[in-house]
Image (spheres, grey):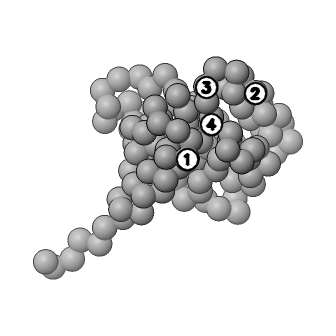
């Protein structure tokens, strides 16, 4: 099992968790969120995130971190947590990516990463006149 760890700006993280549980009509046990508030020091957020990762790695086969915006505080913190093959990071989080990551979280970390990226990309559709 892979834990899906959302590190994102404040209420965005909470909103993603709410949406996932709404869509799936259930609580997702392997979904962890860490809302990052503007007022918090990045070093304290990093310490909390490290604790979460350590606890998760004792229970699961890997952790997939999803962050909202590359280069923003949440993704900068998350990038310090990456352990290739054990803890991976994808930025540019969207709901389709998150749902796909959860759907494939029983697979290997490598497959979960691949499917999450694919879902994120394919979830972006320009609906035009056709």
Spatial CA span between label 2 and label 4: 10 Å
Say which quarter of the image contains residue 99.
top left
Spot occupied by residue 118 in the image (x, y as percentages of width and height)? 42, 58
Which comes sooner in the sequence, label 1 or label 4?
4
CB-based contact (under 8 Å), mark 1 and mark 2? no
Spatial CA span between label 1 and label 2: 19 Å
Residue at image point 35% right, 62% down = 122
Q: Disc 1 vs disc 4: which is toward the camera?
A: 1
Spot occupied by residue 16 in the image (x, y as percentages of width and height)? 46, 41
Say which quarter of the image contains residue 129.
bottom left
- Residue under label 4: 63
- The dot on residue 54 is 2
Which comes sooner in the sequence, label 2 or label 4?
2
Which comes sooner in the sequence, label 1 or label 2?
2
CB-based contact (under 8 Å), mark 4 and mark 3? yes
Determine whether the residue tagged by mark 2 lies in a helix, strand or loop.
helix
- Residue under label 3: 60
Determine whether the residue tagged by mark 3 lies in a helix, strand or loop.
loop
Which comes sooner in the sequence, label 2 or label 3?
2
- Residue under label 1: 110
Spatial CA span between label 1 and label 3: 14 Å
Q: Is residue 73 visible?
A: no
Vertical relation: 72 (above or below) 106: below
Spot occupied by residue 25 in the image (x, y as percentages of width and height)? 30, 26
Which comes sooner in the sequence, label 1 or label 3?
3
């Amino acid at each position: 099992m892979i834990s899906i760890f959302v590190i994102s700006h404040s209420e965005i993280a909470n909103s993603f968790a709410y949406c996932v549980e709404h869509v799936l009509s259930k609580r997702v046990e392997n979904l962890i969120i860490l809302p990052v508030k503007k007022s918090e020091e990045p070093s304290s957020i990093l310490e909390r995130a490290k604790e979460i990762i350590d606890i998760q790695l004792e229970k699961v086969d890997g952790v997939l971190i999803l962050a909202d915006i590359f280069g923003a505080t949440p993704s900068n913190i998350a990038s310090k947590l990456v352990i290739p093959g054990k803890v991976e990071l994808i930025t540019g989080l969207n709901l389709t990516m998150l749902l796909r990551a959860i759907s494939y979280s029983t697979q290997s970390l490598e497959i979960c990463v691949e499917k999450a990226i694919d879902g994120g990309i394919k979830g972006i559709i320009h609906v035009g006149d056709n």
